[in-house]
Image (cartoon, rainbow, N blue to C red):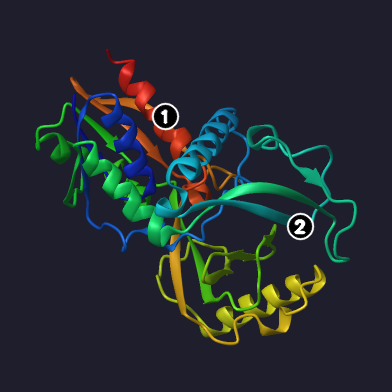
Amino acid sequence: MRIIVVGAGVSGLSCAIRLLERGHSVVVAGELRTPNVTSDRSAAAFTPFRASGDPRLAGWTKHAFDTFGDIEKRCGREAGVRTTVMSEYYFEPFEGEPWWFAAVGGGKLLKSVPERYAWGLRVRVPTMDMRRYMPWLERRVTALGGRIESARFTDLASVFERGADLVVNTSGLGARELAPDARVTPIRGQIVCAPNNIGLAECLADSGQAGETTYVFPFDDRIVIGGTYEKGVDVIETNETALERIVERARLLLQETGHPRWSELARTRLATWAGLRPARVLGANDVSIRLELEQVAPNRPVVHDYGHAGIGVTVSWGCAQAVAELVDSLG
């Protein structure tokens, strides 16, 4: 089939790879591409923590987890994928084990957590250095014979006019206009990037409160520190007060968990940035992913894959596999 994938972020590129592997002719068409897409502004660690309510999530998460493991084994350094330990702390009590433990091969509930938290967990997860991961995905697309082109669409009909037999809609926030879907909502996240000069080797995070969520993700030469969770904010700008709060909370988390050099974190900054998580909100659920086949007109099938909010990287390969299976179902 001649397939056009709309959107050149992590979801679009992952879908393109899975479809090319099945022998389809694929063009990825996006208004922007790396290093200027939303995916480039991801933290990014494997974090299914916020998602719930969709029975498909477990399968998507496991498939993605296994795929990242395979990438790490084959070309981890080139792709920027590395497994590390993450400790996550929660303000609200929880009974049992998280639904996603089974998908990642299990984890450990912590018996002791800092005083202000109710419980915590420890798990091994992949981290993705997006500076390397996004270019690696693009190279994989082109190596398989796909093309990546610049284009902007305002409706699905105009995509088919370019000769597509099928369209895969991974347009993120663009789905508000393209689908159209009024439930698609931006959630701004602000991030500080600092040198990893304190010897941090493990990821730390908490569940967040009142528009703030704290995470500290180390990479070879830098630490990505976040963040904010600002629903409905569609301005891609940072706020100095928010950035200072991010660093303060991150230092406190390091101090509470016993890191000896917590006070040295982010004394200098390498960069700061903001990104808009492409959420799809249904009721209280911010991660209402739309992944389904729609016949928008006779002989005009569209597979939608958007609304991932803050777990787009995490479930990317699982959703891409599901997209490919939907395409296969058309015969």
Neighbor class of circle 1 (other Cα within 10 Å; few <14, some 14-19, many 20+) is: some
Q: Is residue 313 left or right of residue 112?
A: left
**Is residue 198 depicted above or below 122 in this figure?**
below
Residue 28, quarter of the rendered image: top left
Between the C-alphas of marks 1 and 2, the distance is: 31 Å
Q: Nearer the viewer, residue 165 or 197?
A: 197
312 lies left or right of 324:
right
Determine the residue positioned at 62% across, 35% down: 53
Mark 1 residue element? helix
For the C terminus, the quadrant is top left
Give the percent coordinates (x, y) of residue 4: 20, 36
In the rendered image, residue 308, in percent from the top left (x then y), is placed at 47, 45
- Which residue occupies the extreme bottom position in the image? 267
* Location of residue 32 (image quadrant): bottom left
Check disc 2 and report the residue beneath it.
Answer: 89
Q: Examine the rendering and report whether any part of residue 227 can be seen.
A: yes
- State the residue at coordinates (58%, 44%): 283
- Check the image and report above or below for 202 versus 176: below
Q: Amino acid at mark 2?
A: Tyr
The residue beneath circle 1 is 321
Image height check: is 130 above or below 146?
below
Q: Which mark is residue 165?
A: none
What residue is shown at x 44% (from left), y 65% (from top)? 275
**In the rendered image, is residue 280 in sight?**
no
Instruction: In this rendered view, identify the residue nearer to me: 64 or 41.
Output: 64
Residue 272: x %, y % from top left: 47, 77
Indicate left or right for 23 with 261 as reference: left
